[in-house]
Image (spheres, rainbow, N blue to C red):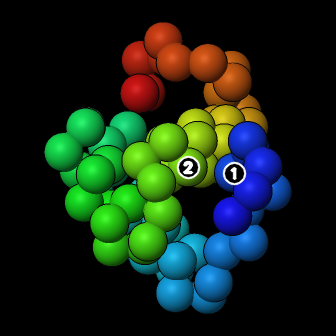
Amino acid sequence: MSGNEAGSLQLSDYQLRTLEENFTKVSKHPDGTTLMLIAAECGLSEKETQKWFQLRNAKWRQAEGLPPNLGSVLD
């Protein structure tokens, strides 16, 4: 997989489903250990997985009408 942005990643249906499930059911902000486990399950690097979560969080926050950065009382 090439590219520096998760948006350029070519994710399989399984990878995307796994990432989305973890985002909605486990944590929107996974800690280092959780991130490592998710990355291993998806066959992605931790950096790629972390970037996906950052972009997915921004998308979620925009949909919720929140500012794009952390710091809200709803975090």
What's the residue at 66%, 74% (across, down)?
A: 11
User: Which residue is label 2 attached to?
Assistant: 48
Mark 1 — residue? 6
Q: What residue occupies the far left of the structure in this picture? A: 33
Is residue 63 something that shows in the picture?
no
From the viewer's perspective, is residue 65 above or below residue 21? above
Badge 1 local density, few (<14 within 10 Å), some, or many (20+)? many
Residue 10 x %, y %: 74, 72
Q: Nearer the viewer, residue 75 or 31?
A: 31
- Of 69 and 15, which appears nearest the observer? 15
Q: Is residue 17 above or below residue 44?
A: below
- Residue 73 occupies which quadrant of the picture? top left
Q: Earlier in the sequence, mark 2 or mark 1?
A: 1
Q: Amino acid at mark 1?
A: Ala
Asked whether the residues under the numbered discs 2 and 1 touch, taking CB atoms below 8 Å apart as contact, a structural biologist would say yes
Residue extending farthest to the top is 71
Residue at point 66% right, 42% down? 55
Q: Quadrant of the N terminus?
A: bottom right
Q: CA distance from mark 2 to mark 1?
A: 6 Å
Q: Position of residue 22 (x, y in %)?
A: 37, 64
- Crowd class of label 2 (few under 14; some 14 to 19; many from 20; radius 10 Å): some
Return the mark for residue 38. none
Amino acid type assigned to the residue bearing label 2 in the image:
Glu
Q: Position of residue 54 (x, y in %)?
A: 58, 37
**Mark 1: secondary structure:** helix
56, 51: nearer the viewer: 51
Element on which disc 2 rests: helix
Specify the quadrant of the image occupied by residue 59. Answer: top right
Q: Residue at x 25, y 37 (%)?
A: 31
Using the image, determine if residue 34 lies above or below residue 21: above
